[in-house]
Image (tube, rainbow, N blue to C red):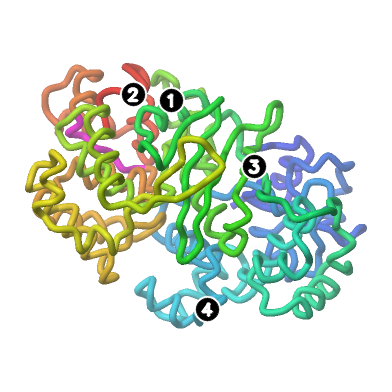
Amino acid sequence: MLTDDQYYQAVLSSDRRFDGVFFVGVASTGIYCRTVCPAKVPQPQNCSFYPSAAAAERAGYRPCLRCRPELAPGQAKIDAVSRLAAAAANHIENGILTEQSVAALAQQLGISDRHLRRVLQQEFGVSPIQLAQTQRLLLAKRLLTDSSLSVAEVAFASGFSSVRRLNALFKQRYRLNPTDLRKRTGMPQDSLHCELAYRPPFNWPQLIDFLQGRAIAGVEQIHCDRYQRTVKIGDHQGWISVSPIPDQNKLRVELSASLVAVILPVLTRVKWLFDLAADPVLIAEHLGDLPEADSGMRVPGAFDGFEIAVRAILGQQVSVKAATTLMGRVVQTFGSPIQTPVVGLTYLTPTVAQLAEAPLAELAALGIVSRRAQAIITIAQAAAAGKLQLTAYADVDTTIQQLKAIPGIGDWTAQYMAMRILAYPDAFPSGDLVLRQVLQMDKAKAVLAAAEPWRPWRAYAAMCLWASLSPVTGDL
């Protein structure tokens, strides 16, 4: 919590640490901006400050067309209440309220409808419906500005039930017609391009090296400093490509036109995978003199939580290369072929349903130890039944307990999954062999004690320690 003067100082200095953490409403213009807006800084008496874009819009402000609030990075969540708010916000960003009610979302999160509303009001200053409405409008604004999709296509991709509803809300909130934002026209494209912002610094080379060493053949690859992979969400499938934009604190996301209908969850998953909500300056302050601590280290997340869970089980007590080879066999056997224009992307990773029904003998025949093969089937069955949530911001304690209750999954594997799947910044696989080697300690308890000063960012500490030895050996 900051004072208005502290908020204003962050705006005055264009402080990137607060980009997306709060927004400033400007009474003299009726717009709201990010802290990094290139426009002239308004007088303090004309400024008011809001915890979210939705709160600023509820107060009657329109999004700035220069700094584009829809491109602001998100916020990393640590404590239980903030993580609950983040979980709810991510479900809403994925479009859950397009098909389900607020009560259904609350039930899925294991809380009451009233508590959900209270948490979102406390964190973002708005109700669930107001948050969903703003996210839809900002996505529509992004697509209208950055793509050649028709207004009708933009409306449905953004979660609106009709073009009429999109037009009405645009005029009400932004005092614009959707067509006023059109910058690109022409024939439909085979792919779309979006931008996602982050707070610098960003150690892209280290992150891309980590992903390259673990890339699943046919599903993902690194080509010319770009991360590429196949995608299947619901009935929609296609491909994406992610690369840094030179001299800008943004990633460029290209996705096949076949994924337009699920663009919300695609972009959300990209944010998880590349840890775009991280505040590297804040994290570095907690990591002290650890190697790479001030380089903008990120914790690689999961584009597909179940995919990483399978990969984690396969990586138990084997090298990164061996685990990657085994995962490739699983994909070849149980995944689905896909045709893409991207050379090398030929398979979709197996779904929860596919592996839940996989015969144990067939999995084991791929060279997988029977105990691990059974663990994969068990975790798939639990996820398919809705008993296990393998998504970012799921309840950490509950999920770790559920994972460790599965024979073949110990604390090390559960902590690694918490790092990458649950987006838990304080996860720490203390039993990891490489961590013990780097810290020159034999016991996991000693490693845990040494890591205590790095709370609540021990996942980033683990990444720094792994990177100090090698970007592609040691851990999973």
Q: Earlier in the sequence, mark 3 or mark 2?
A: 3
Crowdedness near tag 4: few (<14), some (14–19) or many (≥20) residues, C-alpha within 10 Å: few
Q: In the image, what residue type sits under mark 3? A: Ala
In-front residue for pair 227/139: 227
Which numbered circle lies on residue 99? 4
Instruction: Provide the residue designation for mark 1.
Output: 209
Q: Earlier in the sequence, mark 1 or mark 3?
A: 3
Q: Nearer the viewer, mark 3 or mark 2?
A: 2
Find residue 385 and report its horizontal and vertical position in percent. 26, 71
| Position above or below: 442 against 44 | above
Relative side of 450 to 288, left or right: left
Q: Which residue is rendered at x = 67% and y = 32% of the image?
A: 245
Q: In the image, what residue type sits under mark 4? A: Glu
Which numbered circle lies on residue 197? 3
Relative side of 36 to 325, left or right: right
Please, what secondary structure does the residue beneath circle 2 have? loop
Q: Earlier in the sequence, mark 3 or mark 4?
A: 4
Res. 433 in view = yes
Q: Nearer the viewer, mark 1 or mark 3?
A: 1
Q: Which residue is rendered at x = 39% and y = 33% of the image?
A: 460
Query: What is the magenta range?
Result: 426-432
Please, what secondary structure does the residue beneath circle 3 have? strand
Instruction: Provide the residue designation for mark 2.
Output: 472
Crowdedness near tag 1: few (<14), some (14–19) or many (≥20) residues, C-alpha within 10 Å: some
